[in-house]
Amino acid sequence: MAVDIEKIYFDKQEIYELACKYMRGLDRWDKELLGSVFHDDAYCEYGFHNSDAATFVDFCMEALGDHISNHHMIGQMLIEVDGDEAFGEVYFNAYHKMKKEDGSFEEVVIAGRYIDRYEKREGIWKIAYRSEAVDFTRTQDCNEPYYDTPGGQACIRGKRQDDNVYDKERTRKRA
């Protein structure tokens, strides 16, 4: 049986975009987008939280709700496609900025890998199983002088669902 390289390429691209949507869903605090990457019967196994996908999404929205900002980055991905099932290892870095009780800020950086199983159902790839393997973490006080300029911000800051990424009209500006 001949291997259809083009089909495998497009399957891997669709799976890669699931990872991108997952990260955007977390960073922009977009419950609908985050939930859209999982099959309804998917299982999430993180150690500190293990549940069905819908319960996991609710957990994420609550856990990230009081963060000042989040920034999740995808690293290398190795996806092995076998018909309508695929297995993946997705490296990530996650940055979380939080306000401490004394009013100062701290940042938590987590680096690790998602160990996934994907299924293609009715022509659509989604996550059927996701676990998180944490390789290292770091927590430290946060000081952002770049943002704290006299008279205002030095740049446009990332936001939640009112982030510029959701405003396509904004990108049509011309000089």
Image: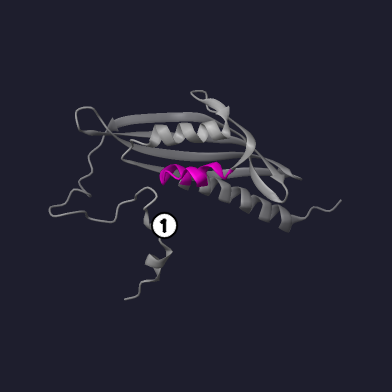
The residue wearing badge 1 is 165
Task: Give the structural element (helix, strand or loop) at label 1.
Answer: helix
- Closer to the camera, 86 or 24? 24
Q: Residue at x 36, y 53 (%)?
A: 162
Q: Which residue in the rendered view is the most extreme toward the top?
A: 47
Residue 31 shown in magenta: yes
Q: Residue at x 41, y 47 (%)?
A: 28
The residue type indicated by label 1 comes to Val
Q: Is residue 172 left or right of residue 55?
A: left
Compared to 163, does 90 lie above or below? Answer: above
Q: Is residue 56 left or right of residue 85?
A: left
Label total for image: 1
Compared to 72, does 131 lie above or below? Answer: above
Residue 74 shown in magenta: no
Please indicate, yes or no, whether residue 92 appears anywhere in the rendered image.
yes
- Closer to the camera, 141 or 85? 85
Which region of the structure is painted magenta? 25-37
Please indicate, yes or no, whether residue 112 appears anywhere in the rendered image.
no
Tell me which secondary structure the magenta stretch mostly adopts.
helix
Compared to 133, does 157 lie above or below? Answer: below
Q: Residue at x 41, y 57 (%)?
A: 165
Q: Give residue 135's position: percent from left, percent from top.
A: 48, 30
Of the 4 image quadrants, the one containing the C terminus is: bottom left
